[in-house]
Image (cartoon, rainbow, N blue to C red):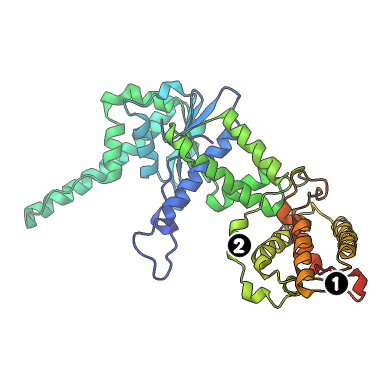
Amino acid sequence: MDSVNIKLSPDMVSVVPGELPFDATVLFKALQYQLLVAIEYCHDLAPDECVWIEVSGDVTVPGRIQTEVKHYSDNLTDSHANFWNTVKNWMHEKFQRTSFKRLMLLTTQEFGAQSELQAWNECTPAERLVIMEDIFASSCNAADKRAAKQKLKEAENESETVKPTKSQALQNYVMDPSRHDTLMEVLERMHIATGAADLEQSVHNYQTRFLKMIRPSKCQQFLDDMLGFMWSFKLLNEGWQITQQDFSTKITELTRQYIKHPDTFPQIDTTALKMSIDVEQIKPMLFAKKLAEIDGDRHLNKAALYRLVAETVISELLSDGVLFKPELDGYMQNHLLQHQFGREKAMLDCSNLTSDVELKKKSEIFYLERNSANVEPFCGMDHTRIEFRNGVYHLLAGEESEDEDEEFHWRLW
């Protein structure tokens, strides 16, 4: 696949009740489709190649291929504007068509049942010209009949002259004898790929083809991050060129981040998690009550966030098969034992204290020391986040135990 000019036909746009007439959702979907095509091109780049977007056409690999992409549901008939307008664009005087080995029309459309274009890719340039001449002749005959009818109407009603249809105007331009040599340069290189996957199917195909090594829950995030890279201000500002090196660097970065068996601890969007926290709903929970015991209510917001971070990461890793319950249980048990030994030592340091105020103060200091301690790697992952480890503490604090000696507490009494 190689360069893209995407337009969605009206019949492909679903109408939502109350939808405003200036809703631009379809345009953004079209842009995503174009960028996805560009991403697929980038995977096939040689070290010295690059992809250009919206420069020589929608998506271009200089010296190799340039493709126009159409996202339509109707059939590609002989007179369809998608075919004739694409040829017209490639005939533009400033378009360097001879620099490409192939010019590709990529469309979600299927050929019309009676279309003469069906054998296009198997034809020689001369045979392709004959096909277009036959289509043009039929179109001209139809236009002549319309003109004859129009003359009758003009004589009877003195109505205005009807202009050529859009399709007829395109054909008139393309088939003008003065542009014959230019047209042949296009026909020597032009191929048509019909029945291309639409946006949703293309996303599925991309994930199946390129993201097998990515954790299932992160495939969409991987693709969103890649689309964001393709749409970045830096690339737009510098001419919308994606080099093989830049693309390879981004792919490596995202693969390392979202791979099924990561060496590095996964990134966490704490901003999004923070917005989902309702402190009033959390206060009755056991881990929050244990903070309240030491007058640590001012730490509750962070504690709730850290707990949610730990829950989210553990849930994702378990569901993706990166983490298994025995490993998780071992990690949790290790932290419980470390905490219990640390608490026993801190309680010895408080053995002479009788004031509740002093005991709560010492307990809060113990809480802060435990939360600021060095972090042990989680399942061997580098850069395990301190928020995650602290969240594990609050998960442990939220568990009830029949044995008081086995329960997780912050209080030093």
Residue type pointed to by label 1? Trp
Which residue is under mark 2? 274
> In this rendering, does residue 109 appear at all?
no
> Which residue occupies 50% across, 46% down?
33
Question: Which is nearer the eye, 13 or 121?
Answer: 13
Q: Mark 2: which secondary structure?
A: helix
Report the side of 89 relative to 74 (left or right).
left
Closer to the chain start, of discs 1 and 2, is 2
Mark nearer the viewer, 1 or 2: 1
**Quadrant location of residue 321?**
bottom right
Q: Residues within 10 Å of mark 1 (few under 14, many from 20)?
A: some
Residue type pointed to by label 2? Lys
On the rendered image, what quadrant is the N terminus found in?
top right
- Marks 1 and 2, how far apart at CA: 32 Å
> Which residue occupies 60% across, 66% down?
276
> Which residue occupies 87% across, 62% down?
349
Report the side of 317 relative to 165 (left or right).
right
The x and y percentages for residue 129 are 39, 29
Q: Mark 1: which secondary structure?
A: loop
* Residue 329 versus residue 103 in the image, above or below: below
Which residue is under mark 1? 413
Question: Which is nearer the eye, 14 or 237?
Answer: 237
> In this rendering, does residue 69 appear at all?
yes
The x and y percentages for residue 223 are 60, 47
The x and y percentages for residue 162 are 17, 49
